[in-house]
Image: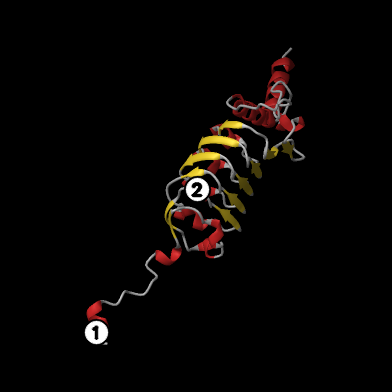
Amino acid sequence: MALLPLLSLLLLFAAVTSPSLATNSEGEALHSFRTHLSDPTNVLQSWDPTLVNPCTWFHVTCDNQNRVIRLDLGNSNISGPLGPELGRLKHLRYLELYRNNFDGKIPELLGNLENLISLDLFGNRLEGEIPKSFAKLKKLRFLRLNNNRLTGSIPKELATLPNLIVFDVSNNDLCGTIPIDGPFANFPLQSFENNKKLNGPELQGHLPPMISDAEEISI
């Protein structure tokens, strides 16, 4: 009889450390995200929270350990907020939510997705500022936020991202100046166009001093 409590403890430990439990928590996060969305074409119909994990859901990709690594919902006619639940998908590498009708602010908690390689949120109705927490995404290579309603300045902290090769914030309402350090030295001006209040890097004090009228006469 003494073996029964020990067996129960072993089963409990196995359940807690099981990859399926982790992936089920990811399924819970995705399901919570879905409950706040409008999905008129039933793109998310397969997202059944009663399944062991979300790896069989359409538009969700998992690795060989059944951990969610990719979410593909581009061009899906979905509307609603970007829920902070997405920040719980800690193994996520690709977050593709472009060309929908997502609105509201970009959650700061997306900065917790430390394995993220690509973040595509372009072509939505997102507003507010670009989260400074994105500076924690050290593996990020592609960040496309263009064609939204974003305001505020480009966080200078993003200049510390060592692997960023594509950055696009065109067609927003950003202000301030464009960073010039780190990867920003290589981004084309098209990545920043159509932000009426955004000044180019050449306006950050790198212009030669203006010559006064008196100095011109003396010359």
Residue highlighted by disc 1:
217
Q: Quadrant of residue 17?
A: top right
Q: Quadrant of residue 188?
A: bottom right
Circle 1 crowding by C-alpha within 10 Å: few under 14, some 14–19, many from 20: few
Which residue lies at the image location 65% right of the left edge and 33% below the top edge? 77
Q: Quadrant of residue 80?
A: top right
Q: Picture coordinates of residue 51 (x, y %)?
A: 74, 23
Q: Nearer the viewer, residue 83 or 128?
A: 128
Residue highlighted by disc 2:
172
Secondary element under disc 1, as helix, strand or loop, is: helix
Task: Report whether 179 appears left or right of 138.
Answer: left
Q: Nearer the viewer, residue 175 or 95?
A: 175
Circle 2 crowding by C-alpha within 10 Å: few under 14, some 14–19, many from 20: many
Tally of numbered tags: 2
The type of colouring in the image is: secondary structure
Q: Is residue 140 above or below residue 55?
A: below
Task: Report whether 65 appears left or right of 178.
Answer: right
In the picture, the disc for residue 85 is: none
